[in-house]
Image: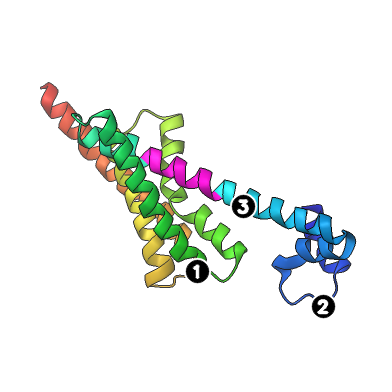
Amino acid sequence: LYIGLLGPELVAGLDDPEQIIPVLAKQHLSTFFYILFCGALVSAILSTVDSALLAAASLISHNVVVPLRSNITEAGKVTVARISVIGLGVIAYYFAVNAGGVYELIQTAVAFGTAGIFVVGTIGLFTSFGDQYSAFTGLFIGSAVWVAGEFVFSWETPYLFALVSAAIAYTLVAMIEHRLFRQLQV
């Protein structure tokens, strides 16, 4: 963070601000240590991407596929996780090739899905309102609205629309769940 804040002062006239750290390393390290630094930087980036893909694939296989198919074998779970890694890898490659830079990639990664997660997490932490269907709906609608607002309609604030949409979707489905649960008890 410190280097990022002082970088423009340390490296004047830099065309691409995302190159501050590599340029500083090239200026202040010998060739051997610069190569070592670049290798470590690439390794850290690839490790982070690998971890994110594996975590997302395990979430998909464990939290989406297994509940839908309760009779799936352990080998089937592993196969689903592997297919998820490949699918998510293709999606990550598409975003990496078409992104304007690292900042844009981070912004996309942070915004996608977090509107729904924020709504579901907040409601789940502080109330007992809603059930699994309202949570799933809030997550799905929040992600779908953000994707539509960001990539289809080019809204100024797609995240804000995604937050509101996720909250409305969660609330509506939770009210339906509550009403159906009450009717089933009578």
Which is more N-terminal, label 2 or label 3?
2
The residue indicated by pointer 2 is 13
Which is more N-terminal, label 3 or label 1?
3
Q: Amino acid at mark 1?
A: Val
Please give the label number shown on residue 74: none
* Residue 156 x, y percent position in the rendering: 49, 70
Please give the label number shown on residue 45: 3
| Bounds of the magenta segment | 49-59
Q: Residue at x 44, y 37 (%)?
A: 121
Q: What kind of secondary structure does the magenta stretch mostly adopt?
A: helix
Residue that extends furthest to the top in the rendered view of this protein? 185
Q: How is the image coloured?
A: rainbow
Q: Secondary structure at mark 1?
A: helix
Q: Secondary structure at mark 3?
A: helix
Q: Residue at x 47, y 64 (%)?
A: 95
Please give the label number shown on residue 97: 1
Q: Amino acid at mark 3?
A: Ile
* Left or right: 184 in relation to 140: left
